[in-house]
Image (cartoon, rainbow, N blue to C red):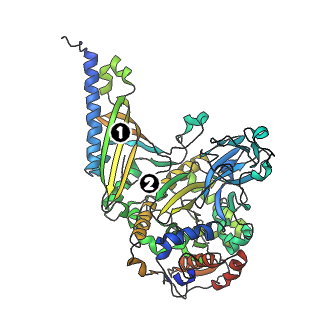
């Protein structure tokens, strides 16, 4: 790391469980993060069901950058930087739509759905000799991958494949994103994206969803109010035994492990929904055997894609906007084949749970807001955050991949691993170096 | 100078409008005074309280820039969920509203959209189950703790229903003039 005149590792005491507050409030570190983390890591961009037909596009973000996710005439998916190669204007200022071209409003350059520069005003007359339009295509990501409908990309051509990037966290993402019956059917985005801005550092969001079992105390008010999908108790159905698992790539997941001797009886607030999920559980167990009951409740794929795998099922991306500003993008998803009444019931539950009006997420955001604010001062910065819960408790399991800490130990293992990996990104000059480093966490 | 004649129908209309305005002002007052349980009493048991999302769409799609019923919304509540929101605030440990926000609800441009019905038959506005379709604008100013300030501005489409002689809110659609929500949360009622 260059911005802070020290190694990022000096700010992250992985073995002692102490993390410097500079990570959350230092503007120089934030700037360097954009290059070291967001320009290199695999980032979540969108979902294939948002661009189902040729010509469909959505505008998304990769870190601070605006990007276009588009499906071309041949059905291929592309991710482009949303900026005209001529003089920088956004070539798309719509959230979504269907188009044949992206035409820049500034000087009229236009690009095809495959990114090719296809129109330049006065091309024949003004450019002598003519410039090669092929060299002035929209900037496209270096690599793109689709995993169970989710679309990921990286700007770094030397990054490993997405599967390698996930490592054993693939298990979690697969279980989180598959249809509930555990098969190979489609999930789909339930509708539009919620986007809102919070005054917090993005990493506080990422670590929360990576598996911070200790923060459940902050949700006491929603548990008392009772918004759950069964008899209106708590905020969700009993997720089972909690197991936290971390992955050397910086990913963290909190699993709920269900009792395999009974069929879960969730979503009892809607008879059809309850029946649908009981039916799915039976198929899921038949398909997936002993791993069927291991459900990722929440997780973060490094750096900033977080998900709820169950109750609600949603993807949240914490896009950095500044050292103390984050743009939250939340989509909700469900089984494509679920009955309409199930989707309707889930949608209402999801929206009262999460998002800016979500009775659970509201209290999280209050904590993230004022943790950021109260760490900003020169005195406050001298005192590291405390992540010592569960130090030394990590082990491995036959059923759940990763470094795990088992019930009943609550642990801050996953944030520790996330910040250790963050420090490695900040210090490492290349992907070769980064891949070699994972052994420290293991 | 002679005043224009005040027909019985016109008088009935003014009387009804005054009742509607008084009702909406009273509702705003209850929210600003944080009398949330009393506010719940103004809602019918089958209320749909809905705040869709606004999108940035091309001109030809401009009529679809408000998320439709069945799409994801900011808020899509029934009476049960609204009651739970109130219950959560009243726990005193709902950290996003503890301490409570300071809010002022300005409700303006109030108009009755199905007024022709009631001009033709003024008494029908007082029959049990009568539905009054209201459009208005809101400006909700929220400030909390030291510097947190939000301006929530937009349109509202309310359906009021006559229940036992009184007006009650049976539907509310809140159309905010923001796409990316600039407030960190929506813990106050609009």
Q: Can residue A34 be seen in this view?
A: yes
Q: In which quarter of the image is the C terminus of chain A?
A: bottom right
Q: Which mark is residue B127?
A: none
* Marks 1, 2: nearer the viewer: 2
Residue under label 2? A357
Instruction: Specify few, some or many for label 1: CA neighbours under 10 Å numbering under 14, 14-19, or 20 or more.
Output: many
Instruction: Specify few, some or many for label 2: CA neighbours under 10 Å numbering under 14, 14-19, or 20 or more.
Output: many
Q: In this view of the protein, which residue sits in the foreground, A262 or A413?
A: A413
Q: Which chain carries label 1?
A: B
Q: In this view of the protein, which residue sits in the foreground, A67 or A236?
A: A67
Q: Where residue B49 appears, x then y in whole percent?
A: 42, 44
Does dot 1 land on a helix, a strand or a loop? strand
Which residue is drawn at the image coordinates 42% and 65% (left, top)?
A369
Q: Where residue B187 appears, x then y in whole percent?
A: 38, 55
Outermost residue, left side: B1
Does dot 2 land on a helix, a strand or a loop? loop
Q: Is residue A270 visible?
A: no
Q: Mark 2 lies on which chain?
A: A
Q: Where residue A336 appears, x then y in whole percent?
A: 66, 51
Residues marked 1 and 2 touching at CB (< 8 Å): no
Residue under label 1? B169
Which residue is drawn at the image coordinates 52% and 58% (left, top)?
A328
């Amino acid at each position: 790391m260059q911005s802070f005149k020290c190694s990022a590792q000096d700010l992250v005491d992985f073995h002692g469980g102490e993390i410097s507050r500079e990570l959350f409030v230092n503007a120089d570190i934030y700037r360097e993060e954009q290059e070291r983390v967001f320009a290199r890591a695999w980032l979540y961009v969108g979902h294939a069901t948002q661009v189902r037909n040729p010509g469909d596009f959505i505008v998304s973000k990769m870190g601070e950058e605006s990007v276009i996710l588009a499906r071309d005439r041949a059905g291929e998916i592309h991710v482009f930087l949303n900026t005209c190669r001529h003089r920088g204007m956004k070539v798309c200022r719509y959230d979504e739509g269907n188009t044949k071209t992206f035409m820049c409003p500034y000087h009229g350059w236009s690009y095809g759905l495959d990114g090719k520069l296809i129109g330049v005003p006065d091309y024949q007359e003004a450019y002598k000799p003519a410039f090669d339009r092929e060299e002035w295509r929209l900037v496209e990501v270096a690599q793109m991958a689709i995993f169970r409908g989710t679309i990921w990309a990286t700007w770094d051509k030397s990054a490993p494949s997405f599967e390698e990037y996930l490592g054993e966290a693939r298990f979690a993402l697969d279980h989180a994103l598959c249809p509930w019956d555990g098969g190979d059917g489609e999930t789909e985005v339930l509708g539009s994206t919620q986007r809102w801005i919070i005054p917090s550092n993005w990493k506080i969001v990422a670590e929360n969803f990576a598996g911070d079992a200790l923060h459940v105390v902050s949700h006491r008010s929603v548990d008392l109010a009772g918004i759950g999908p069964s008899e209106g108790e708590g905020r969700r159905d009993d997720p089972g035994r909690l197991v936290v698992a971390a992955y050397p790539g910086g990913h963290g997941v909190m699993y709920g492990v269900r009792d395999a001797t009974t069929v879960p009886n969730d979503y009892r607030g809607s008879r059809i929904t309850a029946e649908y999920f009981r039916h799915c559980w039976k198929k899921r167990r038949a398909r997936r055997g002993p791993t069927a009951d291991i459900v990722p409740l929440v997780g973060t794929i490094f750096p900033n894609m977080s998900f709820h795998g169950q109750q609600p099922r949603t993807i949240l991306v914490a896009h950095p906007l500044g050292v103390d500003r984050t743009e939250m993008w939340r989509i909700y998803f469900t089984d494509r084949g679920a009955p309409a009444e199930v989707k309707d019931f889930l949608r209402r539950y999801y929206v009262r749970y999460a998002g800016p009006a979500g009775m659970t997420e509201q209290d999280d955001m209050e904590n993230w807001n004022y943790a950021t604010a109260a760490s900003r001062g020169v005195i406050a910065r001298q005192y590291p955050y405390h992540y010592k819960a569960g130090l030394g408790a990590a082990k491995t399991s036959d059923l759940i991949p990763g470094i795990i800490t088992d019930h009943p130990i609550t642990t801050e293992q996953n944030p520790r691993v996330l910040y250790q990996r963050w420090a490695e990104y900040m210090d490492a000059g290349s992907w070769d170096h980064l891949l070699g480093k994972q052994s420290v966490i293991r | 100078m002679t005043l224009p004649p005040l027909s019985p129908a016109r008088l009935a209309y003014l009387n009804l409008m005054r009742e509607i305005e008084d009702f909406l002002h009273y509702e705003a007052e209850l929210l600003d005074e944080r009398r949330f349980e009393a506010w719940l009493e103004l809602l019918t048991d089958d209320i749909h309280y809905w705040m869709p999302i606004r999108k940035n769409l091309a001109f030809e799609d401009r009529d679809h820039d408000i998320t439709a019923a069945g799409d994801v919304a900011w808020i899509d509540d029934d009476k049960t969920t609204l009651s739970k929101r109130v219950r959560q605030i009243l726990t005193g440990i709902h950290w996003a509203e503890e301490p409570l926000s300071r809010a002022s609800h300005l409700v303006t441009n109030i108009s009755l959209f199905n007024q022709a019905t009631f001009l033709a038959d003024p008494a029908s506005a007082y029959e049990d189950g009568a539905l009054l379709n209201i459009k208005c604008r809101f400006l909700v100013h929220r400030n909390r703790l030291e510097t947190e300030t939000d301006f929530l501005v937009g349109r509202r489409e309310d359906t009021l229903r006559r229940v036992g002689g009184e007006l009650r809110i049976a539907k509310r659609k809140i159309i905010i003039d923001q796409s990316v929500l600039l407030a960190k949360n929506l813990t106050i009622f609009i």
